[in-house]
Image: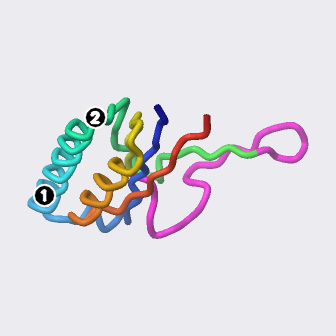
Amino acid sequence: MSRYMILLPAPEAEWADLPPEEHEKGMRSHQQFHEDLKAGGHELLVAGPLEPSAAATSMRPDGAGGTLVTDGPFTESAEQVVGFYLVRSDDEADLRAACERWSSRGELLEIRRMAE
């Protein structure tokens, strides 16, 4: 079975300003995705939201054998990864179909098979 990382990018500032009913709609969409995963025989290994990108710490080599540590994400962009799913599956086509159904309900997502 292969493992797949499903990344959830979103415009953080816009998401924070959505009314409660939009957040509830999003939670129902996540619940439906969980049901689709189970129905397709996919194994949800772990999932969760991430704290805002402003709370990230980025680290990169400084070129002199040390590390440059900065507050915030690596890149500034309108969309940041706000959550993720790690799924194990032996049916990539069905998993992609479940992701397409989820996206059609308004979710932005990126799916990538993990290197073995």
Point out which mark residue 41 bears: 2
The amino acid on which the numbered mark 1 sits, given as a three-letter code, is: Lys
Is residue 72 a member of the stretch shown in magenta? yes
- Identify the secondary structure beneath mark 2: loop
Which callout, 1 or 2, points at the residue further toward the start of the chain? 1
Residue at 26% x, 40% y: name it: 40
Range shown magenta: 61-82
**On screen, residue 69 above or below 15:** above
Give the quarter of the image for residue 50: top left
Circles 1 and 2, Cβ within 8 Å, touching? The answer is no
Residue at 16% x, 48% y: name it: 32
Q: Residue 5: image x %, image y %?
A: 46, 44
Give the quarter of the image for residue 16: bottom left
Q: Nearer the viewer, mark 1 or mark 2?
A: 2
Point out which mark residue 25 bears: 1
Circle 2 crowding by C-alpha within 10 Å: few under 14, some 14–19, many from 20: some
Q: CA distance from mark 1 to mark 2?
A: 25 Å
Residue at 20% x, 39% y: name it: 39
Q: Residue 33: image x %, image y %?
A: 23, 47
Q: Is residue 60 left or right of residue 38?
A: right
> 109 or 19, which lies in front?
109
Point out which mark residue 90 bears: none
